Image (cartoon, rainbow, N blue to C red):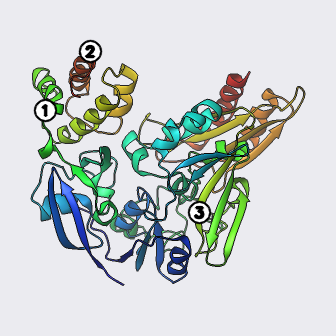
Amino acid sequence: MLPLPSFQYEAPTDVVEASRLLSEPGSQLIAGGTDLLVSMKHRLFEPRLLVSARRLGLRGISEHAGWLEIGAATTLHDVARHPTVLARLPALAAACRTVATPTIQTMATLGGNLMLDTRCMYYNQPAGWRATLGYCLKREGTVCHVAPKGRGCYATHSADTVPALWLMGAEAEFSSARGVRRVAVSSMYREDGIAWLRLERDEVLTRVFVPLDTRRVVHRKLRTRQAIDYAQVLVAVAGPVSPGGTWTAVISSVSSSPILVEAASAAELSEAAFRACQPLSTHLAPATWRKKMVRVEVARAAALIG
Amino acid sequence: MPDEIVLTLTVNGDKHRRLIPASRTLLDFLREDLGLTGSKHGCDVGDCGACTVRVGGVPRLACITLAAEVDGEEVQTIEGIGAAEAPLVAAFDKHVASQCGYCTPGIILSLSHLFEQDPAADDAAIRETLGSNICRCTGYTKILAAAREVAARGGQTR
């Protein structure tokens, strides 16, 4: 039994009020809660105040001027079954459908997936487990057990929907009491396992915009089991806009930020991806295998584009 | 700001109104506060599916759902199954799809949602759905047999 720490709870009905609550130290937004509550049970987060997104009116999908607007609190289940997503953005539907399990997809939200904490076998563990190792660099400790001689935290970016959204040219809207800003999904992350997100603490991810005239994207997730597991390698690939144009891949689950790779041909793309990615060993797979599988998965995705 | 909330929840048709800690999970509310122990405490971190209940008809993992987050909703637990789920339960009996039984309540609620959506669900859909629930006894063979029988009858679980 892993009890939750105690906290205060508010469910505001507008984003400005939510932002005001989030600006206070020790407050934390909860959407689907499928990762957050587990992390709280593990004492990775012990917020003083949970600010619920459930009454913010951020659920639903609509189409405006060539963009699909997806409310950040729309569940992955609903995104994956929306007719426009299935018809025009099948890689997004596929990505949503590979998250964890079907039941988790009915709870977890698209916004939550974009904001997903970076993961590590030494971090996503119960407090007692972590205590035996003196904790780790990402939380409460001073040493990274993955790379003890390294200088940073290597927790991996593992959000299944991000590589596909990145290649589609998706944008995310953040609201706060200070205003609204809209940024490319590709600019949201940085290569730092501890501070992986470019975000102010009072900002609420409100909507995700996906252009409907996007290039065809193929998403692939390599994992040990076809349910529950996070990816060993996560790739999305897009072909050239016109003949002779650039092939593009975004690879995730191998570093703290997704990695963008471009090349003149599909064959060069998989080689470039192989060179660009330096995955670390996990308890499920050695680094050498994961690195080779980056090449294989990019090639498989490119072959599906043709 | 409150660290307790007044929760209003309809569980298996009965309306409840209780003052609870904001940190109460839906699973603990059902098991400890209401005494409905059919929803099981398995992994406690959302991996195993033993705590699956339906909220507004949709399967949810009660161990990683705050009771506060489903305030005002209708919850169905294994104690609340009825005629709609009877063919599924009968198929589980016939195929001995339950051994230790710990995973069974969650699997019944996952599959009942599937067959409500798609009474003649194909094998791929059944397997995808069962990805939500871990069973360590049966190897899934008997569970699949039971689910296939229900699907073959066009989903009389409706």
Gap between marks 3 and 1 measured at Cα: 42 Å
Gap between marks 1 and 2 measured at Cα: 18 Å
| Residue identified by numbered label 3 | A205
Residue B83 disc label: 1
| Relative vertical location of residue A239 with respect to residue A164 in this rendering, above or below | above
Q: Chain of mark 1?
A: B
Residue A169 disc label: none
Q: Chain of mark 2?
A: B
The amino acid type, in three-letter code, at marker 3 is Leu
Residue B152 disc label: 2
The amino acid type, in three-letter code, at marker 2 is Ala
Quarter that holds the N terminus of chain A: bottom left
Gap between marks 2 and 3 measured at Cα: 44 Å
Quarter that holds the C terminus of chain A: top right
Q: Give how far across and how far down residue A47 sits, in percent.
A: 42, 76
Q: Give how far across and how far down residue A187 sits, in percent.
A: 73, 58
